[in-house]
Image: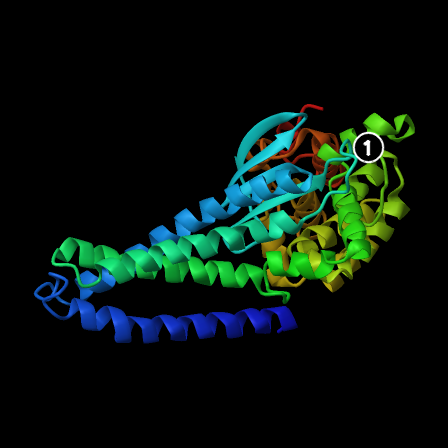
Amino acid sequence: MKKKEIVSLIFWLAVFGGYIAYFFTVIQPFYSTGDSGFSDSGWFAYFGLFVLTIAISTVVTSILYEILHIIGAKMGGYKVVSANIMRFNWYRDDDKIKFRFAKFDGLTGETKIVPNTKRKKEANPTWFIFLNSVFFVIEFAALYFVFFYFKNNTSSFLRNLAHAALTFGLTAGVIWLYNILPVEMENKTDGHIFSISKGKEKRKEFNKKLIEEFSGTLAISQVSEENEELKGPVITGNNVESIYAAIMLNEKDKAIEIIDALLLDKEQGKNQLMLKAWKFFIQSYDASLDDGKVMYAENFSLEERRSVSGSDSLVCIAAYILMAGLYDKSQSECIYVLEKTPKLLKRVPTSKKEVEIKMVNASIDKVLGFHPNWDLAKYKIAE
């Protein structure tokens, strides 16, 4: 296990233990007496209410967290590229706000930002990181007041409300604590962002990396407004957007160089499979059948092959068509992933569609060159 996975495991074991202790020392004694009105309903009734309160708190806190991230980003001089709450993703594409279901790198959501280069003052992520903390202190104080004020009220409804408020606040506190701890967790957190952006020099590097990371979407239009020579595909550094730029510029060796650098970057954990698939696509496409087969066997375990076929990335789909068609010689596997492409294409930002469509079509053509009788041509995407 990686260090960040161990840290996350320890955190959640501590949280689980804390919930058990809280349930048996606070919730169970209250609900098992006549104070709650649930004493005759059995333990499953108040346990169900306890779990429901945790679920409601998780959803509400997740929504508030990303709303506050958006507000904090604006206060700090950033533009919001996308906001994702439990896979509900609103994103900016060609200056339009669009919606899709998408994965995210975070506990319950993720807000992606980029510095507003039109602003004279340097963008500062302090409010983006800590506005949630300010809100949580106020929220928990209010919820604890509700608990303290109503826990002994003559109304059983208000007594139940008091304990629900305490559980709600405890769950919000767990989410807040996970996000604010200044250590690297399995998911991206505010605490980790703070650790890599505190101080003037680190902040400059952090902002530069954000611009590089989103240079293919929102940031490239911002940079281009100030630098006419940067219009069009731009390789800005070792980031995913620069791979697209390198492919569009037909600089395959540069694309491989960027991919290799990203594969060594521990912050690219969520993108590792896509990056491997992308490298395989570029290298195997022009390789001999024997060389490509060796690459396939040496670089992808059976589990990874299944993950590539089940991916919602068209980059992975393009790579898997080569895997299944050239090396596994399975027409059914090719058709299986190709039938998903119309749905997946809707999720691809406009700036990336050209590259990903060409990759899928190129894979189909390559496979048809070896298996001309396969029924794959109808799956080609109009360019």
Total labels drawn:
1
Image x and y of residue 311, in percent: 59, 48
Residue placed most toward the observer, 110 or 354: 110
Residue 13, horizontal then vertical, whole percent: 46, 74
Here the colouring is rainbow
The answer to whether residue 245 is left or right of residue 192 is right
Q: Quadrant of residue 199?
A: bottom right
Q: Is residue 301 visible?
A: yes
Residue, far left: 40
Q: Quadrant of residue 36?
A: bottom left
Given residues 111 and 173, the one toward you in this image is: 173
Q: Position of residue 103 (x, y in %)?
A: 56, 47
Q: Is residue 30 above or below residue 262?
A: below
Extreme residue in the right direction: 229
The N terminus is located in which quarter?
bottom right
Q: Residues within 10 Å of mark 1 (few under 14, many from 20)?
A: some
Mark 1: which amino acid?
Val
**Label 1, on which residue?**
223
The front one of 179 and 248 is: 179
Query: Which residue is drawn at the image coordinates 78% and 62% (left, top)?
Result: 264
**x 59%, y 63%: residue:** 186
Residue for point 75% across, 64% down = 298
Q: Picture coordinates of residue 323 (x, y %)?
A: 69, 50
User: Would you place residue 52 above or below residue 210 in this image?
Assistant: below
Q: Residue at x 32, y 61 (%)?
A: 166
**Image height of 20 relative to 172, above or below:** below
Q: Quadrant of residue 154?
A: bottom left
Q: Is residue 288 visible?
A: no
